[in-house]
Image (cartoon, rainbow, N blue to C red):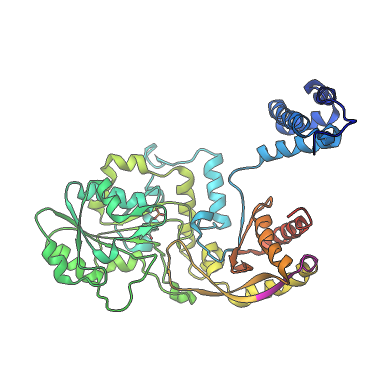
């Protein structure tokens, strides 16, 4: 608005029309706001909104802020915004099941229930109920981990990065750990094997080349300073073509002949052979142990399907040494994690019900036909609204990813809603819709491919369908607003 108009009230007269804080507080809505959010929050919101109103008047002589309705809506907006959790529930339609940035594994009801109970009540976390004295928190899951992996002993820390770090510090400080050059991995978020070694005080000895490592490379690297031979699962890439790697069994033999342990960082660590569910195979801790690994590390929230945790299983004497390291205390997990981990491990005792109960496995094993059926059911419900904005929606075959560095090159056939523009304005609306969905009360996260919005339905569970459709409806309505 320009400031040259003639018959306008002076700024001071407009400012004096704004209600006082006390006046707003005495209005009937205020009592409800105080009940819901507290007086302090209301005062904060009032200050924010009144500041904004003054600015509108001073800068633009905008009188919209003088209406009671405007004031009420703005106060409500500020209150709701501050009340909304930062840890937002989202609808993951990226097609990546174990999405690290979206919190990895979604957990089963049994697991959530166990975690809630651990949170709400005192629990025997480190308490030996038989003896009535102090116990060891690892015992909550140790027996089950041993049963599932064939290991003698187990311990749990904050995440797999911590597991690798602790293991190296406990067993290889100031000593050498031998790793193939083809396995010096970087995981997203700056977890790099060479860096973690350095920080753990271990000396990295790289052997072989990027594409080929042989038995003699390991043999020649052994010295009196060697503490460990290590294998790192190249979980987020594949080396293809003219390649050679040394089998775990062989590395184990070389290590044991030299009197040092062989350790394997598996990363994803599925506890079962995924091939039995029609999924690509991923090495299991049990296989590594059977091949002669003395210790194996893996994550709790990747294919295992539970809470964030790092699990170390293997030889009892080595686990004991790791547990005596003071860093174990710094990296240990809390009761909620242990309760969740225990509950998720228990599900593995019945491989028949596992694919229906373990959410991650359930999502991974959904046949493309399921997602196609979902898409075809949704299309008639959303396409009329979309058409108003020159948008079309179709069901396309797509490929989902497992994610979290698990099985990087394998793709799972899936189906997606693909939203495209019917003309230039429609194309702009696709971009706006993606943004509107992402900023919804329950954000919907899809992915853009060229000019299309792809919403892979693999991770849309039946009990979230209504929420998705309602969110979609509101977001499409948002297209009516200013671009
Ligand atoms: C994912 C992964 C890690 C890190 O595990 P976090 O649970 O994310 O800490 C380490 N090593 C490998 C091989 C991995 O795949």
Up-down relation of residue 93 to residue 392 (above or below): above
For this view, does 350 lie left or right of residue 51?
left
Residue 468 in percent (x, y) is at 69, 60
Let me know if residue 140 is in the magenta part: no
Quarter of the view holding residue 410: bottom left
Q: Nearer the viewer, residue 335 or 34?
A: 34
Residue furthest to the left in view is 224
State left or right for residue 310 relative to residue 221. Answer: right
The image position of residue 260, as x and y in percent, is 16, 58
Judge from the rendering whether residue 216 lies leftward or rightward of residue 170; answer left or right: left
Q: Of residues 348 and 393, which is closer to you in this image?
A: 393
Please identify the quadrant where the N terminus is shown.
top right
Q: For the view shown, which residue lies furthest in the right direction?
A: 7
**Residue displayed at 30% across by 50% down:** 196
Residue in the picture at 24% in, 52% down: 318
Query: Whereabouts is ligand 1, in terms of quadrant?
Result: bottom left
Q: Is residue 318 visible?
A: yes
Residue 130's quadrant in the figure?
A: top left
Q: Quadrant of residue 416?
A: bottom right
The residue sitting at 41% across, 52% down in the picture is: 189
**Magenta highlight on residue 389:** yes
**Closest to the observer: 445 or 260?**
445
Q: Is residue 155 visible?
A: no
- Residues drawn in magenta: 385-395
Give 103 or 329, whichever is nearer the viewer: 103
- In the rendered image, the vertical position of residue 300 relative to residue 19, given as above or below: below
Q: Looking at the picture, how far across and down is residue 246, in whole percent?
A: 23, 71
Q: Is residue 253 above or below residue 243?
A: above
Horizontal placement of 388 versus 410: left or right?
right
- In the image, residue 263 lies at what x, y percent? 25, 59
Could you tell me which quadrant the C terminus lies in?
A: bottom right
């Amino acid at each position: 608005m320009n400031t040259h108009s003639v018959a306008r009230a002076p700024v001071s007269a407009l400012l004096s029309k704004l209600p006082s804080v006390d006046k707003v507080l005495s209005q009937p809505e205020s009592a409800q706001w105080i009940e819901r959010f507290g007086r302090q929050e209301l005062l904060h919101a009032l200050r924010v909104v009144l500041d904004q109103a003054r600015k509108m008047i001073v800068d633009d002589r905008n009188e919209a802020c003088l209406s009671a309705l405007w004031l009420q809506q703005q106060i409500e907006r500020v209150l709701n915004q501050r009340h909304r959790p930062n840890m937002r529930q989202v609808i993951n339609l990226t097609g990546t099941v174990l999405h690290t940035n979206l919190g990895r594994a979604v957990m089963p009801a049994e697991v959530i229930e166990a975690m809630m109970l651990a949170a709400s009540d005192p629990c025997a976390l480190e308490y030996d109920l038989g003896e009535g004295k102090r116990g060891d928190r690892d015992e909550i899951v140790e027996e089950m981990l041993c049963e599932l992996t064939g290991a003698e002993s187990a311990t749990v820390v904050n995440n797999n990065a911590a597991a690798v770090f602790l293991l190296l510090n406990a067993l290889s400080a100031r000593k050498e750990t031998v790793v193939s050059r083809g396995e010096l991995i970087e995981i997203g978020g700056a977890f790099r094997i060479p860096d973690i070694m350095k920080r753990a005080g271990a000396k990295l000895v790289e052997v072989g080349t990027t594409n080929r490592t042989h038995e003699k490379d390991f043999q020649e690297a052994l010295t009196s300073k060697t503490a460990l031979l290590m294998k790192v699962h190249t979980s987020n890439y594949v080396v293809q073509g003219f390649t050679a790697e040394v089998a775990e069994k062989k590395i184990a033999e070389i290590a044991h002949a030299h009197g040092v342990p062989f350790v394997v960082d598996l990363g994803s660590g599925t506890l079962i052979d995924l091939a039995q569910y029609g999924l690509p195979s991923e090495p299991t801790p049990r296989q590594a142990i059977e091949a002669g690994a003395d210790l194996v590390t893996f994550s709790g929230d990747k294919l295992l399907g539970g809470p964030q945790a790092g699990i170390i299983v293997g030889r009892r004497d080595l686990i004991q040494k790791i547990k005596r390291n003071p860093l174990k205390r710094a990296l240990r997990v809390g009761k909620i994690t242990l309760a969740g981990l225990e509950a998720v491990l228990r599900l593995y005792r019945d491989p028949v019900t596992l694919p229906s109960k373990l959410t991650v496995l359930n999502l991974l094993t959904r046949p493309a036909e399921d997602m196609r059926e979902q898409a075809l059911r949704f299309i008639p419900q959303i396409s009329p609204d979309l058409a108003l904005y020159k948008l079309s929606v179709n069901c396309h075959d797509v490929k989902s990813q497992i994610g979290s560095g698990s099985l990087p090159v394998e793709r799972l056939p899936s189906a997606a809603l693909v939203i495209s523009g019917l003309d230039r304005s429609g194309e702009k609306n696709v971009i706006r819709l993606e943004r509107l969905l992402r900023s919804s009360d329950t954000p919907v996260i899809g992915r853009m491919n060229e000019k299309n919005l792809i919403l892979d339905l693999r991770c849309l569970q039946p009990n979230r369908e209504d929420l998705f459709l309602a969110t979609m409806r509101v977001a499409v309505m948002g297209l009516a607003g200013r671009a």
